[in-house]
Amino acid sequence: MNREALSVFDIFKIGVGPSSSHTLGPWRAAERFLKKLHAPEKVVSAHIDLYGSLAKTGKGHGTDIAVMLGLSGEDPVTFDVTQLNNKIQQIKTDKVLLLNGTHPIAFVYETDIRFLKNETLPQHPNALRFTATLNDQTTISGTYFSIGGGFVEEEGESQTDKTSVNLRFDVHDADELLQNCMRAGLNVAQLVMENEKAWRTKAETEAGVLRIWEVMKECIFQGVHAPEGTLPGGLNVARRAQKMNKQLLKNISYQNFDEWTAAIQSTSPTFTNVMNWISCFALAVNEQNASFGRVVTAPTNGAAGVIPAVLFYYHLFCGGKSDRQIIDFLLTASEIGSLFKKGSTISAAMGGCQAEIGVSSAMAAGALAEGLGGTPAQAMQAAEIAMEHHLGMTCDPIGGLVQIPCIERNSMGAIKAITAAQLALQSDEDRMKVSLDAVIKTMWETALDMSAKYKETADGGLATNIPLNLPEC
């Protein structure tokens, strides 16, 4: 079991779509490689090799775009995504990359990024290697592994290389979490906040979490107001969130985000309408994600719509209005996500889609259950129920794109999360048969047994049974 300490901001990261493991992770790896170049002005060229899943679905996931932007010194948190196409086209046309934003080097896209589809490094299926040639013909290289959720490890890196912190509550599994909550008289969110003080002040954590919430809201709002049309990548998948928003609001007019949310709440809160809104919110986020928009990794980009959709449902329809409630929801969700990362995986390339949609659904379910007044045990039960019914879910993206079946799965994951929370709140926690730790262990064993073709390679499942005659992606 991985015993690293994880912060809420390790689980929730602001970045650019469409994939945390194939876009954000390689982008961060490129940034780390830049730090190895103590004299970037001596570099004359750079070369990137992509292995395994990064090679097989890298173009569809924008891995090539991510490494070019990362080497250019751009930050995924602040980069102007509206300039993405122009920036990449300029590099390809000029055959020049501005290393770290300051030093021009020769860079030929067609030859300096290699997609080695038949080569996989043993440490992890998401591997990439950077090689820089200096003006004296010597080279500097670095090999990195994008292990899911935007997390990156360098070859040879050990746990002792990572910054260690002393947390008030040492939590590595759900049983330890519940024991600590009981002994300290805290709920999950309160316990997480105590641990976050090892990194920063309470006020800083609260401000950072609210910034995560703002990005989530912006993503939903932009998604439901994006122009009609199809998503990029060649599948010609139609955007649906905008149309759903119009249909649900009928003729209600509004001018800004606050008026839009007021308009939503003025519509009939029937079961069907609420279900449609939840789906609309999730679709909006993942349509933005598929379009290289700014999203929050939650805990991955492919599953980025589940938690915002459930949190917005909690905010609009369940009284989760205050900053305190929003912060607590995200703190609880992050702790559940960290349990899965420590005890299993949040990488589809390692565990299939159960590691992405399944984990995000479990995170949302536990957070919602606690937000609605549930005990820590009921929150864990909700997370367990949500994951139990995602076990074995494969990752088989058509065309290697985070679109089919990924976008719809976010809606499904959100609905399952809400159902799981309600089931947990209506159940006797003392009679629970399956623990969250048991389901995390089972998920990892299932991941190990799962065929590699169902782990984000586009080599099996829907990816091979839908004849689309797409170009290589």
Image: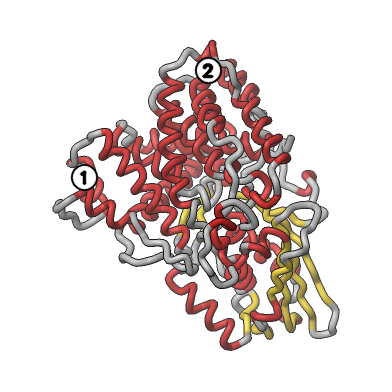
Could you tell me residue 75's position as x and y percent? 55, 65
Quarter of the image with the N terminus is: top right
Left or right of 277 on screen, residue 65: right
> Which residue: 47% across, 36% down?
364
The quarter of the picture where residue 54 lies is bottom right
Position of residue 384 measured from the top left corner of the image (x, y, whole percent): 55, 27
Secondary structure type for disc 2: loop
Few, some or many residues within 10 Å of mark 2 (<14, 14–19, 20+):
few
Q: Is residue 186 visible?
A: no
Q: Residues within 10 Å of mark 1 (few under 14, many from 20)?
A: few
Residue assigned mark 2:
185
Q: Residue at x 59, y 20 (%)?
A: 434
Which is nearer the N-term, disc 1 or disc 2?
A: 2
Residue 440 percent location from the top left of the image = 64, 31
Amino acid type, callout 1: Ala
Looking at the picture, how far across and down is residue 286, in whole percent? 44, 54
Foreground tag (1 vs 2): 1
Position of 201 compared to 244: left or right? right
Quadrant of the snapshot with the C terminus? bottom right
| Vertical side of 47 occupied by 262: above or below | above
